[in-house]
Amino acid sequence: MADAAHPIGLSIRNGLKVYPGTVALKDVDFDLHIGAVNVLVGENGAGKSTMMKVIAGVEQLTQGTIMMEGEERVFRSTDEAARHGIGIVFQELNLFPNLSVSDNIFIAREKTRAGVDIDMAAQREETRRLLRRLEHDIDPDTLVGDLKVGQQQIVEIAKSLAQDARILILDEPTSALSASEVEILFRVIADLKANGVGIVYISHRLEELIRVGDYITVLRDGAITGARSMDGVDVPWIVRNMIGEASKDFAKEVEHDYGAEIFRAEHISLPDKSGGLAVDDVSFSLREGEILGVYGLMGAGRSELLECIIGQQRDYAGAFFMRGELLAKRGVSDRIARGLALIPEDRKQDGLVQILSIRENMTLSSLGAFTRGIHMSLKREAETVADFVRRMTIKIASPEHEVSSLSGGNQQKVVISKALMTDPKILLMDEPSRGIDIGAKAEVFRVMRKLAADGLGIVFVTSDLEEVMSLSDRILVMSNGRVTGVFGKDEATETALVEASALGHAPDHAPNTAFKEAS
């Protein structure tokens, strides 16, 4: 129900959306309040993104109506929705990597001089203004493809702000942002609210929703299971409405002994484009069955370290060893053959081929396992895919559907399955829970614990304190490319990790703690 401070700006009534083999939305009634943050939560595949795509004109309802200002509306395109003041920042970024930041922000809405040519100077200046509002100093002429995922997310948000939307949909806007960038985003949201913008905020970070939200809607299997003001809402209430459980189950530890050292990094350094070091003299070791969490803020060098290990970055100094043997070859295929596998941060760009089927994506890195001579066993491939779909609880109608048809969390499970099919000895995971809901996150983490108990060594990067503390056997903290702290699971505290991540250099009293054994 609307109140005087937050009138209803858009409503969906009796909304039904049917895809072949899937009912994505079932009899949905939804009210969007203006001048407020309307948070939307649910497990992957619950229908959140579908409902937002309907509002933004990407999809149309199979049945039901959209009402704005007392009139029925049908948005047949994003342009039509934009003309009615609706903007959206998608979870999967929609940017042109070969164009500059300013070109991306003003694509199809270019500023012109008397309608004759594009006013590039005006676009650059407006881009600088938007990025200053977001408290970021990114050169407007920088190619988007050269930016990190978090910076690209900032560009997406700036792109929506440039359109002066009256309704702004943010789909997982903080999934690739550091803690400081999240604070900036929240300040921008408060400013937008004060200017009468209605915001739809989708996130799997439940504490974040409670902090930023004014109204909440919970979806489960395409149906709304709870809708109310945020007054009095807590995490257990959200979880009960999402999955029918009163508490989170992140990762119940599987007790096991660690084996011998399986991997070692010695004095790894990687130059960056500015002449400095993206990775600065990093050393660590990993034992069989150990989960090593790498915690740090964006720009700490975490992802670049994993890229060195897997062979994406070849111009690093230092050395890697597996079971004491030097990894001399630096190609990705060579590293995979030696038993390394990577779950990349950006699944859309680096983890999946969107036009291929779920089956083809899952077996892409392990086709040799199904091939004898020139013949490939499609039966064995199908059986293996079915086994991983079952083990990873991937929600699919058919493995032959395009992987792009899956929700973000289920796509992430496909990427993890693809890596596990190579039978790795060491699994590298870069933000493995990005875009994954609470239920899927628990499933992925239980799989990680089981794999570790079976002897797999795991290195996983995260900016989530709760994750790194609940899952890691040992935690390595990075800041500005350097190791600034290493903690056993029994001595790590949130305060200690945050303080270490804020250091610009390794602490003087612990120059080489990276080889500290797990307790």
Image (spheres, helix red, strand yellow):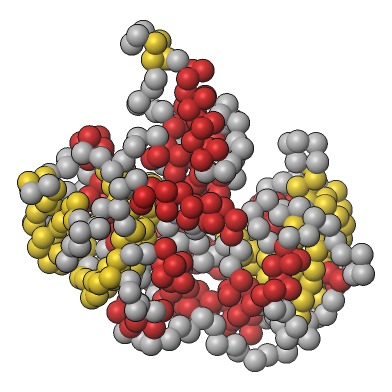
Q: Quadrant of residue 213?
A: bottom left
Residue 108 x/y as whole percent: 35, 26
Residue 430 x/y as whole percent: 60, 60
Residue 82 x/y as whole percent: 26, 37
* Vertical side of 193 occupied by 135: above or below: above
In the rendered structure, the answer to whether residue 222 lies left or right of residue 260 reads left
Q: Which of the pair 347/245 is nearer the observer?
A: 245
In the rendered structure, the answer to whether residue 476 lies left or right of residue 394 reads right
In this figure, what is the number of numbered marks? 0
In the rendered structure, the answer to whether residue 434 lies left or right of residue 336 reads left
Q: Is residue 477 visible?
A: no
Q: Which of the pair 509/406 is nearer the observer?
A: 509
Q: Quadrant of the N terminus?
A: bottom left
Residue lying furthest front in this view? 4
Identify the residue shown where x is 38% and y is 40%.
Answer: 160
Residue 314 x/y as whole percent: 76, 45
Q: Quadrant of residue 17?
A: bottom left
Identify the residue shown where x is 68% and y is 71%.
Answer: 293
Identify the residue shown where x is 39% and y is 79%.
Answer: 234
* Vertical side of 250 occupied by 322: above or below: above
Q: Is residue 495 visible?
A: yes
Identify the residue shown where x is 38% and y is 55%.
Answer: 171
In the rendered structure, the answer to whether residue 98 lies left or right of residue 506 reads left
* Vertical side of 171 occupied by 396: above or below: below
Q: Quadrant of the C terminus?
A: bottom right
Residue lying furthest bottom in this view? 255
